[in-house]
Amino acid sequence: MSNFNWCHGPNCHTKQTQSRVRGSKGNKVLRTIKIKYRQPNNSYWFQHWWNYFCNQSCLMEFVQKHIQGMIALEPRREPLETKINDPYKDTTKYYNQWTIEERT
Ligand SMILES: [Zn+2]
């Protein structure tokens, strides 16, 4: 397995930044950003997508292009629910935040 990925953003190669310029004089191109692969780590959950997209803009352009296919992977036709205890205002917390606890 290679230790890098090409950014999956559908428009990555069209963004006019210095970091994308490649090629010899008179033969320049804007090229998709190469991303160093980092082992996903629990403390940086976002690294999962950082391994495939150079920035959030490229990620969201991919989502915009493929949203119907993504939803088709796991269609949701009914809402999900998590059982909780009755919420209460906790006066020991900053601004008396409401406390919601999952029912065990
Ligand atoms: Zn990109």
Image: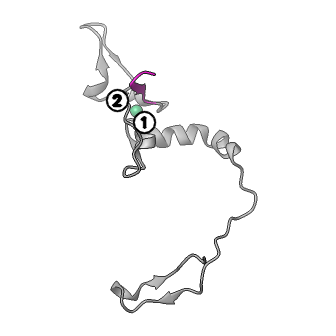
Which element is circle 1 on? loop
**Residue 98 x/y as whole percent:** 47, 84
Nearest-to-viewer mark from 1 and 2: 2
Q: What's the amino acid at mark 2? A: Lys
Left or right of 2? Residue 22 is: left
- Give the residues in magenta: 1-7
Picture residue at 40% right of the left edge, 40% below the top: 50
- Is the residue at mark 2 in contact range of ligand 1, meaning its CB lies under 8 Å from it? no
**Image x and y of residue 9, in percent:** 46, 33
**Is residue 4 inside the magenta stretch?**
yes
Residue at x 48% of width, y 43% of height: 60
**Residue 29 inside the magenta-drawn segment:** no
The quarter of the displayed image where residue 12 is located: top left
- Mark 1 residue's CB less than 8 Å from ligand 1: yes
The quadrant of the rendering that contains the C terminus is bottom right
Q: Position of residue 47 (x, y in %)?
A: 40, 43
Residue denoted by label 2: 36
Give the quadrant of ligand 1. top left
Mark earlier in primary sequence (1, 2): 2
User: Is 80 placed above or below 40 here?
Assistant: below
Q: Residue at x 36, y 86 (%)?
A: 93
Amino acid found under the numbered disc labelled 1: Phe
Furthest toward the bottom, the residue is 91
Q: What residue did someone put label 1 on? A: 53
Crowding near pointer 1: few (<14 within 10 Å), some, many (20+)? many
Q: Is residue 78 above or below residue 94?
A: above
Instruction: Residue 44 in the image: state x and y as whole percent.
Output: 37, 49
